[in-house]
Structures are given as C-alpha cells and as structure tokens.
Image (cartoon, rainbow, N blue to C red):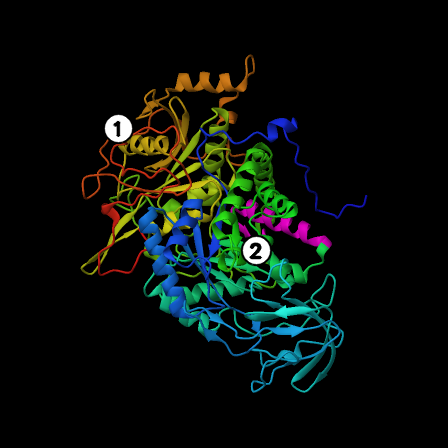
C-alpha cells in the first residue's frame, strides 16, 4: 500500500553498527585504490600543466573538454597540457569531449582573456518581478531586459504560463546565477516574461524550457540535431591531433540520436571512440531503454534533468537509471555532486551524503563540472570525492548486488522478452563503437592466432548496425557465465584481486558489472597492426576507456604476451602498488583456444611470484572459507551452473594450471606495461622485474615498447 508499482528500493544495513569503529581513520597499509572513478572538466581553474598533474595525482581518471564554451584552440591547448601532465606523472587518463547539441544559449558579445578563455565584460542583473523579453531576433542586443537566443524557432515552443529557466553555464546551487521566469505573452519574435527571483547572470547563459506537465511530455521540443555543425567541426579538428576516448552526447532523446552520432564518428574514422548518452530531459527518461541499449555508457546529467523532473521524484529516477545501467553492464556517470566546493574547500553534509548514496546505488563514475572548471579548489574536490567514495565502497553490499543480477539473469532466461530494449517505435540495435558484444568471442578465433593474439574481423570496424539488427544472445550468455563465475570464485576464496586478460575490455566490463569486492586488474593485450608501410599499436584506447568502469584497474601489456611469465610480472606490479601481499589469493580469467579458464593462484611468500593452487588444495580452500562442517557444492560455489535447456555447461574451466610457461617478451625484449593511476606504493616490494620503477602514489608507467612514432597522432600521454 502506498508503494509505486514495480519500484522498490532497499535499506542499506551495515554489518558493523558500532559508530566508534566507523569514525576510525583509514588503515595506512591499505592500497589507495578507489573503485569509483572521477571525471574532471578542464577549464581556467586547472588548464595549466601543474594543476593537471595535481589532479592526476589526486586520482582523476578522465578529463573532459566541453565544446559548449571555449575556442577550439583552447581545447587543443588543454589536451596538449594534459599529455604533458600524463608524461610527467606517468599516469593514464581518458579524454572525453562533450558536445553542445540542442543547447539554447543567450547570444551576447564576449572577449577572450589572456588564457584564451571567452568571458563577458558585464553581468546582467535581473530583479524579482521585472519584465524580461526573450527574443529570437538575431539583431537584438543583450541587456538586463532583453535576451536574444540562439534558436530561431523559440516562440513556437512556449505557451503563456510556461516556466523557463535561465542560468549560467554549469551553474551551481551555491551561486545566484539561476533565474526562473514565467511566460506572460508571445508577440512575434518576442516572449514576454516576468522574473520570479533575483539573479546575477554572469558568463555564458543558457535557456531551459521546463516541462509544463508534471508527468507527461506536452512541450514542443526544439528540432536541433544531436550534433551541431560546430560540434562536428571541433570533433574533427581535435581528433586530427589527439586520440579521443569518449564523446558525450548532450540532450540525447532517443536511441536514434546515438545511432546518428555513431554513423558520423564512423565516417571520420573514429570507430574506437565510445559514445556516452547524456540523459538531461524527461524525454530521455521515456526513451531510456533504447538509449541505454544503444550507448556505450550513460551520464545522468542531474543539472538539467532536475529542472525537468519534480524534486520529490529525482532520487527515484536516479536509483532507477543506475539500476538499469547496472543490469545492462553499462557504465553510469552522475553529475552535480559538490556544487558548494566551487567556492568552499569542504562540501556540505548533504553533498557528502549524496556522493556516498550514489556509490551505494552502484554508480561507476562521478563527473565534476564547475567544481574543476572554474572552482577555487579543484584538487581538494577530487580528493574529497574519492575519500567519500572509498568509505562508501567499504559498506557496499556486494553479495546483494551479485545475487540480484544473477536472479535477473535467470528471469531473463525464462522470459527472453524482458531483454527486448527495442521499444515499439524504434526497433533499435546497439551501437558497435568498434567493440561489439561478439568481438571478444571472435577475437581469438582467427586462424594463426593463439589465446592472446588475433585480429578483429573487418566487419567489426566501422560497422554501424542498421535499425532492427541485433547481436546474438548466446555469445553474451557465455561471457556472462564466465564473468559471474570469476566473481563468485573470488568471493569464495576471499581473493584480493581479479586479473582479466582482454583485448577489447568487454570481458573485464562484465566482471565489473557484478561488482566484486576486490579490484579488477584489466590486463589489456595490445595488437600490432600495419597499414601500408606504417605500424601502429591498438590497445591503448581500450586501457583508457576502462577508466570510467567501476573497480577496473587497466594495465597495458607488451604486444602478444602469454604464459606464466606475464602473470608473475603482473603480480609483482600489483604487489608493488599495494594491491596484493604475500599469500593473497588471485583469480585470473583468460581465454585459451576455444575455452575460457578461471585460474586461482596465490602470491608467494616473497611477493615476487605466484604459486599454483592444485585442484585438491582449491577444494579445501573453498571449504575452509565456507565454514567448518558446511557442505559445499563445488559447481555452485564456482558458478558452474548447467544450462537448464540443454543440460550442457558453458565452455569454461576453473583450474590450477593454465598452460606451459612461456616467455612474454615484447619487441624490445621486455614486458613493460602501463599501470592504472589508482594505487599507492604501500607495503610494496621493490625491483619488480620488467617494470619501470613506479612513483610513490597512484601511478601510470608507460614503456618504450608502446611509445608512438614521432610522425603519428598524439596519443594522450602514453
């Protein structure tokens, strides 16, 4: 009674309820690894190399350039500085471009400051009760009483009585740059309004037409494209010099928007770039199933979405969106978390609780906008966010999350129609963005390639599926089984780390979907490819794109390694950065031939290698962790559930041995690799073989084996 049908949330019960223990400081011997990732927006507060270095050292894993504001040269300079910061700190950082899309802006004159950032000379002051004219007349001049807008059909969207929000670009709740006006009349090109509050409109000012219906879509939507001509021009210009990992699509309304963006990226040879759908209007919620199926990740843009959704419904919307993304295994990002840190060095209690609740809900990544773009404390903001996230992760209910996903998977097997995200009006398929659901499976089936080699079939590059086409589900079922089995095995043996060998990152993302309690070291195996007389390595982009996935710790290996030597080197590296210690257990996921292998090993007593756990010892280990006298079904414990329809098990093994030891040398005779920036050297071993010496904090070491040639595109600091 009193419950919305189909929507039930869960109270977070903490196992340890002694408040004194909750107040204890963090254990200094713990690795400084935070599963939740942080995206920072580059702007005047942090564009210089020194500040970018500090942000990377603080734990930022992705940098965002917003094409809505700022010149192309400014954004290029930002990425140049980011490359230099990565070179200095030896840390890996993904690059995201955010589009303007369907944004409606107030047009007024501006000038470029000494840093190259556009700014307005005078603020616009509006008082409560004042009459204000919003005009689509392109010749009108902006003033305190007249606001010319960029959309030439604005008057067709509004009606008398509508509410319009006018605010500063990336406005925060701690600023007085938010204005609500009510439409009184429409006269030709002009919309006559009355201001509902006082506001100081500084900087770039945008317009948002709030939905007039409390629960439906009654507003006329603007007919602007998902990407403006300026967006496309800027993306081409930036991509000509830098590798772009993500494009964030502002004001995504449908799956077709994502398809259109994918077709554009394919046309300019950006097949490896992934698409993030920004949900910031009510229409995106009504079409969310198709959007989530099409996009590679979802961003819950809470600033604009909070204007289009009733305040009392916003928390439920957030939980539902995160839940749906978790079920699909798609990374989900939330925005607008610590607005007050634009000016204050400490968040409010409500903001700190908001961040923690987002982590407990299952979010992958937190994005900072104004906090780092123009805030006074960008580095402190990143550090604060990560500290809050880490504490929330300690009480995250991993078992509940895992069992919920397994239950949903079984329900989907019994009711396949539950997996239909087409929406009757769309019939949309998922965007491929270079890595389709099938690609990880096809990857090692190419003739002449072993377990860690192989090339993508040509049809998986630049191929955008037509509407109505869909990937085959049996392949996904197999990968889901492997991922869930790895997480279950890691939980049963209380492993300290999961290592996933991957070419595309897809298997690792599926393991992340099940939210294990331990880090997932994603060992990306790059491929050496040739075009005419030029050689290039593919794999760096995969490692960077793992930087928005929860618990993922991307490591870039030398090309085509295999065998026990590589595993030992990775374990040494993990020990060096504090992820494992002597006698810790590790679960490894690797494909060998046509089979997946889940291997459980232990770190040896000197923390410079591994010890293979034989099957009998493995059974005893699992029984010991299950408790004395408790019967353990080994198939169930390790996730080997038989297929109910066929009676066959998926092709997978959980073994003590993988393959005969073999050398894993790169072209330069070593196996150096790039390390994810979210670990600290505490209690670490020294002189790890085949690895560069790692700095004392969250580290990314990059090797000569994967350095790009001088005549190639800049590669984001690697």
Residue receiving disc 2: 343
- Magenta stretch, main secondary structure class: helix
Which residue ends up furthest to the right in the rendered image? 1
Task: Assess whether residue 591 is covered by the magenta stretch.
Answer: no
Left or right of 376? Residue 464 is left
Q: CA distance from mark 2 to mark 1?
A: 58 Å
- Packing grade of label 2 (10 A; few <14, some 14-19, many >=20) is some
Q: Which percent across, then down, holds residue 53?
A: 38, 50
* In the image, residue 134 above or below residue 412: below
Q: Residue at x 32, y 31 (%)?
A: 572
Q: Is there any visible trace of residue 597 in the rendered image?
A: no
Earlier-in-chain disc, 2 versus 1: 2
Q: Which residues are magenta?
A: 312-338
How many tags in the picture? 2
Secondary structure of the residue carrying tag 1 is: loop
Q: Residue at x 42, y 33 (%)?
A: 498
Q: Nearer the viewer, residue 663 or 382?
A: 382
Left or right of 333? Residue 673 is left
* Closer to the eye: label 2 or 1: 2
Q: Is there any visible trace of residue 623 in the rendered image?
A: yes
Q: Which percent across, then down, holds residue 713?
A: 28, 60
Q: Residue at x 30, y 39 (%)?
A: 451
Q: Which percent across, then down, holds residue 677?
A: 39, 43
- Packing grade of label 1 (10 A; few <14, some 14-19, many >=20) is few
Residue receiving disc 1: 660
Task: Assess whether residue 332 is covered by the magenta stretch.
Answer: yes
Q: Which percent across, then down, holds residue 290?
A: 57, 58
Which residue ends up furthest to the top in the rendered image? 629
Secondary structure of the residue carrying tag 2 is: loop
Image quadrant assignment for residue 75: bottom left
State the quadrant of the N terminus. Answer: top right
């Amino acid at each position: 009674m009193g419950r919305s049908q189909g929507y039930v949330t869960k109270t977070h019960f903490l196992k340890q309820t002694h408040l004194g223990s909750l107040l204890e400081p963090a254990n200094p011997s713990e690795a400084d690894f935070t599963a939740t990732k942080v995206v920072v927006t580059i702007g005047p507060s942090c564009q210089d190399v020194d500040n970018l270095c500090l942000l990377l050292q603080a734990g930022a894993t992705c940098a965002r350039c917003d094409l809505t504001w700022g010149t192309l040269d400014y954004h290029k300079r930002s990425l140049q500085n980011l490359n230099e910061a990565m070179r200095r700190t030896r840390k890996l950082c993904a690059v995201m471009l955010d589009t303007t899309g369907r944004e409606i802006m107030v047009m007024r004159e501006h000038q470029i400051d000494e840093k190259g950032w556009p700014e307005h000379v005078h603020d616009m002051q509006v008082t409560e009760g004042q009459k204000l004219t919003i005009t689509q007349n392109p010749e009108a001049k902006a003033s305190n009483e007249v606001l010319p807008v960029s959309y030439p059909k604005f008057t067709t969207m509004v009606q008398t009585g509508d509410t319009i929000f006018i605010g500063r670009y990336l406005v925060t709740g701690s600023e007085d740059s938010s204005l609500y006006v009510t439409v009184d009349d429409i006269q030709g090109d002009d919309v006559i309004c009355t201001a509902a509050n006082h506001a100081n409109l500084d900087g770039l000012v945008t317009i948002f037409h709030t939905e007039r219906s409390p629960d439906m879509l009654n507003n006329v939507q603007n007919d602007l494209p998902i990407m403006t001509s300026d967006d496309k021009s800027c993306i081409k210009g930036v991509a000509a010099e830098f590798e772009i990992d993500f494009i964030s699509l502002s004001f995504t309304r449908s799956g077709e928007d994502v398809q259109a963006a994918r077709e554009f990226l394919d046309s300019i040879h950006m097949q490896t770039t992934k698409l993030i759908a920004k949900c910031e209007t009510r229409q995106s919620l009504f079409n969310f199933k198709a959007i989530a199926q099409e996009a590679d990740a979802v961003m819950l843009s809470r600033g604009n979405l909070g204007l289009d959704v009733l305040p009392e419904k916003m928390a439920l919307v957030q939980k539902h969106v995160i839940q749906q993304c978790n079920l699909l295994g798609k990374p989900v990002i939330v925005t607008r978390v610590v607005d007050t840190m634009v000016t204050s060095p400490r968040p409010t209690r409500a903001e700190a609780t908001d961040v923690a609740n987002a982590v407990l809900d299952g979010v992958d990544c937190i994005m900072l906008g104004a906090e780092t773009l123009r805030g006074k404390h960008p580095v402190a903001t990143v550090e604060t966010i990560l500290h809050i996230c880490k504490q929330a992760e300690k009480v995250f209910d991993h078992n509940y999350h895992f069992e919920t996903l397994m239950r949903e998977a079984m329900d989907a097997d019994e009711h396949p129609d539950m997996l239909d995200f087409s929406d009757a009006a769309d019939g949309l398929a998922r965007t491929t963005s270079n890595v389709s659901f099938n690609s990880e499976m096809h990857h090692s089936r190419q003739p002449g390639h072993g377990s860690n080699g192989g090339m993508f079939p040509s049809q998986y590059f630049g191929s955008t599926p037509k509407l109505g086409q869909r990937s085959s589900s049996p392949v996904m079922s197999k990968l889901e089984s492997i991922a869930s089995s790895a997480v279950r095995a890691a939980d049963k043996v209380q492993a300290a780390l999961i290592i996933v060998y991957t070419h595309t990152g897809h298997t690792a993302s599926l393991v992340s979907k099940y939210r294990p309690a331990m880090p997932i070291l994603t060992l990306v195996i790059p491929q050496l490819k040739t075009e005419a007389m030029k050689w290039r390595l593919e794999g760096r982009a995969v490692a960077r794109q793992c930087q928005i996935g929860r618990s993922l710790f991307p490591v870039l290996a030398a090309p085509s390694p295999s065998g026990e030597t590589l595993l030992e080197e990775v374990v040494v590296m993990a020990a060096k950065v504090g992820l494992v210690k002597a006698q810790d257990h590790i679960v490894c996921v690797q494909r060998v031939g046509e089979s997946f292998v889940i291997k459980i090993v232990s770190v040896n007593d000197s923390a410079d290698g591994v010890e293979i756990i034989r099957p009998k010892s493995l059974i005893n280990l699992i029984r010991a962790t299950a408790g004395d006298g408790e019967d353990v079904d080994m198939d169930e414990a390790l996730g080997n559930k038989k297929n109910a329809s066929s009676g066959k098990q998926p092709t997978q093994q959980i073994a003590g041995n993988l393959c005969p030891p073999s050398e894993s040398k790169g072209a330069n005779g070593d196996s150096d690799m790039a390390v994810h920036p979210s670990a600290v050297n505490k209690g670490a071993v020294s002189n790890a073989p085949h690895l560069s010496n790692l700095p004392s904090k969250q580290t990314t070491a990059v090797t000569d084996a994967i350095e790009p040639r001088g005549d190639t595109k800049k590669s984001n600091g690697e």
